[in-house]
Image (tube, grey):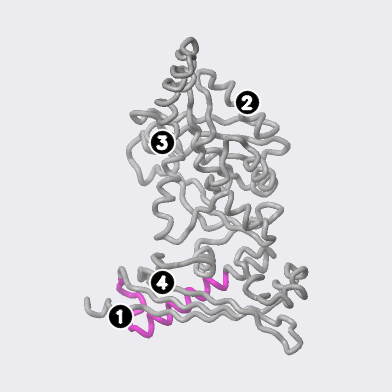
Amino acid sequence: MRRFTTLLYVLPVLLTLSGCNASLASDRHDVERLLLIQTMGLDREEDQLVMSVSSGLGPDDAPALVMSTPAFGIEDAIAKLQNYSPENQLFYAHVQYLLLGEEAARQDLTNVIAWVDRSPTLRMDTDLLVVRGTAEDAVVNASEQSTDITQRLASLDRQSRSVGWTIYTLREAAAALAEGGGALCLAVRTVPTDETIFTDEMRSDAVIPTGYAILSGSGLAGFLSPEESLGAELLTGDPTGLLITVDGNTLEVLEGTAELEGEYAPDGTPTGIAVRCTLRTGVLEKTPGGAGSPEEMDAALSETVGQWVSGALEQARNTRCDFLGLKKAVLTSSRAMASWGEDWTELFPELPVRVTVDGIVDRSYDSAE
C-alpha cells in the first residue's frame, strides 16, 4: 500500500517535470482508477479454471469488490474480470494471498507456480493456502459489507505463531518442491457464523485452519490433521511460543528440540530412523480433572506429543512425500547419499521409525495451588 501511495503523489510531479502537461489529467485519472486485488482464488472445474478475486475493503470501509469467473486459463480469467469492472483498472501486484481449491491444488499447482514466477505483476512471496473445498466459496462467502476474505486471512496470519501453524509463501513451497521432497502449506475451510455472530452485516463465513496440506511435485498429496501439523512443526521448526492443550491443560512451549538420525547395519544399509524430541513447557491454564501430579503431567505431555510426531511421520510415509526433510537427516554422508539418494522415495516408507519424547512441564504452577 505504501508503494501505491508513493506512486499516487510522485507521478504527477514526474509528468510535470518532463513536460507532459497535456496528459497529466488522464494519467492522474488512470492512477485513481487502479483497484488493488489483494486475494486471488483458483479452482479447477473439469476443463476450466475458475478465478475469484477480492479487492479488500476500500477507504472508509467501502465494501470489497468480489468477482469470480470461469476461464480457460489464468490470463483469460484476468481479461474477463477486467471486462466485468470497466470503471476500474484491476491491479494484481499487491495480491497478498493466493488460495487454491482442492482440485486446483491437485491438478494445477506446478502450472500456477510457474505462471506466478513468470508474471510481471504477481510476486512469489505471496502467501499460499489450500482450501478444503473450493477457493471460490472462501473468497465469496467470507466477504460481506463489513469484512472480506483478506481481513479474515490477515487475522489468521497475526495469530498463527501462538497456535501452531505457519503460513508459507509460494517461494517457500517452490523451493521445498525443487529440492525433490515435499512442501507444506496451511489448509483452511469456511464455516458459517450464524450461531456465533448475531449482527446481520457480519454473518459472512469465517475462515479457520484445518492443519497443513501436503504438496508434492505433482500437486496436492494429502492433508495433515491439526494434531499431525503440530507434530510437523515440532520436527521442522522452532516450537518456542506454541500453545498446546494436553489432557485439558493449556501449555506454552518454552523450549523444544528435535533430532532425527538414521540407523544403519554394519554394511551401511539404512535400517531405521530414530526421532528424539525434547519439550519444556509452562502451564498457562490448569483444568480440574486433568493430569494432576508433576509425573502425570510430564507423562501426558510426552505421550500426546509422541502421537502427534508419529502421525506426521506416518503421513510422510503414506504419501511418500518427504516434507519433513528425512532424507537430509538420515543420509548425512556423501557416501550414503550416493548409495541411497536415488532410491530414497522407495526406501524411507519401509524404514521403521522409533519416536522418543521427553516432555517436561515447568513446576511454577505448584506455587499457585
Q: Given contact means CB atoms under 8 Å apart, are the residues at marks 4 and 3 in contact?
A: no
Dot in front, 4 or 3: 3
Name the N-terminal-most of marks 1 and 2. Answer: 2
Q: Are marks 4 and 2 in contact (CB under 8 Å)?
A: no
User: Quick check: is 309 in the magenta stretch?
Assistant: yes
Provide the residue designation for mark 4: 246
Residue for badge 1:
363
Q: Which residue is mark 2?
A: 79
Quarter the C terminus occupies: bottom left
Tell me whether circle 1 and circle 2 mark residues in contact (CB < 8 Å): no
Q: CA distance from mark 2 to mark 3?
A: 26 Å
- Mark 3 surroundings within 10 Å by alpha-carbon count, few (fewer than 14), some (14 through 19), many (20 or more): few
Residue 55 part of the magenta segment = no
**Image height check: is 229 above or below 143?**
below
Q: Are marks 2 and 3 in contact (CB under 8 Å)?
A: no
Q: Is residue 1 visible?
A: no
The reply to whether discs 1 and 3 touch (Cβ–Cβ < 8 Å) is no
Secondary structure at numbered mark 4: strand
Q: Secondary structure at mark 2?
A: helix
**Mark 3 highlights which residue?**
2
Nearer to us: label 1 or label 4: 1
* Residue 101, image x, y percentages: 60, 44
Q: Which sits in the foreground, 45 or 280?
A: 280
Residue that protrudes farthest toward the left in the picture: 368
Q: Earlier in the sequence, mark 1 or mark 3?
A: 3
> What kind of secondary structure does the magenta stretch mostly adopt?
helix
- State which tag comes first along the sequence, 4 or 3: 3
- Give the CA separation, mark 4 to mark 3: 43 Å
Measured Cα–Cα span from mark 1 to mark 2: 62 Å
Which residue is pictured at 40% across the width and 51% down the height?
158
